[in-house]
Image (cartoon, helix red, strand yellow):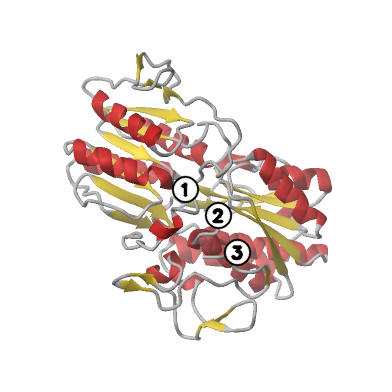
Amino acid sequence: MFRRQIWGVMALLLVLSMLVAACAPAPAPAPAPKVEPTAAPAAQVEPTQAAEKPGLQIPDVEKGKFNVAAVLIGPHDDGGWSQAHYDGLQYIEKNVPNTHVAYVENVPEGAEAEQVIRSLARKGFDLVLTTSFGFMDPTLTVAEEFPDQTFIHVSGFKTNNKNFGNLFGAMEDMKYLAGMVAGSRAKVDKVTKLGYIATFPIPEELRLGNAFALGMKKTCPECTLDVRWINTWHDPVQEKAAAESLFDAGAQVVFTGADTPAPADVAQAKGKWGITYDWVGSCKVERCLTTIYWDWGKVYAKIAQGLIAKTYKPGFDYFDADSGALGIFGFMEGQQPTKGMADLPAEDIKLVKDTLAKMLAGQFTRFDVFAGEIKDNKGNVIVPAGEKMQQADLDQFPPGAEGLKCKYCMYWWADGILAELPKQ
């Protein structure tokens, strides 16, 4: 989200890298005109020194402090994925003594990303966080050149188990709960079709869509889920068009795997319901049913503290809901239910709350979300009763990576999903 433990062995995803540049929000294969990458300290003070590419600036470190920088795929205030990471930086600076944080935003993947990461390392940043799937190989390359600094990549599957590690979380936990809420809302409204704005045809997006559908069926057995692929992580125009398409096709509730609050904004105009993603502050309009979000600060602060104390070793770090780094808006401590939850059946709200409590206590994990019996949308039994998917199943298309075959794998749509499988 993303848990995050991790995907240490998802080598099969290397094949998918030819289809998609990111497992965390990233530009579309045919993006809008590029925004020139810029950089600034998280406190939004202007940087002072230029990087290797003309026009690109890299922030400075503060001597005597533990310096942390994040490389962001989008704007730091995008209202989604990148803003959630920006908030995580702010949390570090406020909660870990003697730290300084900074970021570089709108960084394209590939050679430019490698330049930025290397420039941050040369400046002397102690910890560099890279937050899109397509930053993985550039991060590994730079990490090998700077063995005395630490590099953590979010959403990938590679590590050198020395100074380069990976981080992600079980957002399927929260998608499962959101499916329960959405199913309940659709049932009350007597319009039992829902919609999913899916980004790229990768195991992660099938996993999250399936988790949502499994939750949906808990509160609305008759509900179905329509799907629109947009092949981008962040494109306000495409996201809005996909939301409109789903609503116009009869969906009462639409959720997203992309960055912007498009489902809620379009729902507001159409008198329906939207579920946003990534950032806690994205559920702003009345017709936002909830948002599923990341709280990176707790995880980032733990890593920073561990590096300062020399107790943290980079590797595969995968967190579940009990980390406190995942949330569903309207149900977490200190939050009030949204308007769209007010008239939902008490038994449905209780189911969400009880399941969330088990998740936060570590008694219900991502593997429980995918516990059998599970059938696909053609009636086939995917996971038999008494069995559970394992990490290799959640992360991979069949047959899985060499030496880490998946038994059930993530190449199926759950019962109720009205879509064909994407080509592998």
Q: Secondary structure at mark 3?
A: helix
Q: Quadrant of residue 177?
A: bottom right
Give the mark nearest the N terminus, 1 or 2. 1
Asked if 390 appears above or below 245 in the picture, the reply is below
Q: At 45% across and 77% down in the image, what residue appears?
A: 408
Residues at circles 2 and 3 in contact by the CB criterion of under 8 Å: no
Which residue type carries mark 1?
Ala
Instruction: Decide if residue 364 is in sight here.
Output: no
- Vertical relation: 60 (above or below) 2: above
**Residue corresponding to mark 1:** 22
Q: Position of residue 57 (x, y in %)?
A: 39, 20
The residue that disc 3 covers is: 212
Which secondary structure, mark 2?
loop
Question: Residue placed at 41% from the left, 51% from the top?
Answer: 155
Pointer 2 residue: 200
Question: What kind of element bears circle 1?
Answer: loop
Nearer to us in this view, 41 or 397: 397
Callouts 1 and 2 close, C-beta under 8 Å: yes
Q: Quadrant of residue 346?
A: bottom right
68 vs 383: above or below = above
